[in-house]
Image (cartoon, rainbow, N blue to C red):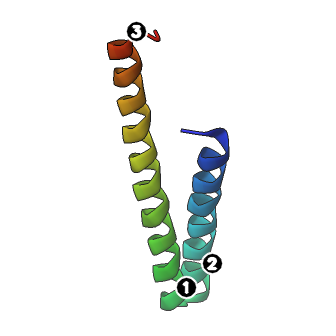
Amino acid sequence: MGVHDKFENKAEELKGRAKEATGAATGDDDLKTEGKADQASAAIKQGGEKIKDKANEITDKIVGNN
């Protein structure tokens, strides 16, 4: 997982947390839901990147790069 991707995914997660908290504090259910959706999207992306990292590790071991 590239540092840039990690940063973007974390930023999206934090943005989602902020939206959810703001929505909860102001009673804006749409904003709260949007924040949860942003967090879920970031989690899915982070999971996909972790799978790619593992696949690269396995490939490197098979090929002998590590």
Residue at x-position 54% and y-position 89%? 27
Query: Compared with residue 5, is residue 25 higher up or lower down, i.e. above or below?
Result: below
**Circle 2 or circle 3, nearest the eye:** 3
Distance between the Cα atoms at labels 2 and 1? 7 Å
Distance between the Cα atoms at labels 2 and 3? 50 Å
Side of 57 relative to 17 (left or right): left
Q: Are marks 2 and 1 in contact (CB under 8 Å)?
A: yes
As helix, strand or loop, the secondary structure at mark 3 comes to: loop
Q: Amino acid at mark 3?
A: Gly
Residue picked out by circle 3: 64
Q: Earlier in the sequence, mark 1 or mark 3?
A: 1
Please state the horizontal and vertical placement of residue 47, each as a whole percent of the image: 39, 47
As helix, strand or loop, the secondary structure at mark 1 comes to: helix
Please state the horizontal and vertical placement of residue 12, each as a whole percent of the image: 60, 62
Is the residue marked by circle 3 packed among few (<14), some (14-19), or many (20+) residues within 10 Å? few
Residue picked out by circle 2: 22
Query: Compared with residue 51, is residue 48 higher up or lower down, i.e. above or below?
Result: below
Figure quadrant of residue 13: bottom right
Distance between the Cα atoms at labels 1 and 3? 49 Å
Residue picked out by circle 1: 31
Depth order, front residue of 24/53: 53
Query: Compared with residue 19, is residue 2 higher up or lower down, i.e. above or below?
Result: above
Figure quadrant of residue 25: bottom right
Please state the horizontal and vertical placement of residue 41, each as a whole percent of the image: 45, 65
**Circle 1 or circle 3, nearest the eye:** 3
Q: Amino acid at mark 2?
A: Thr
Depth order, front residue of 8/34: 8
Q: Earlier in the sequence, mark 2 or mark 1?
A: 2
Depth order, front residue of 57/29: 57
Q: Amino acid at mark 1?
A: Leu
Side of 11 relative to 54 (left or right): right
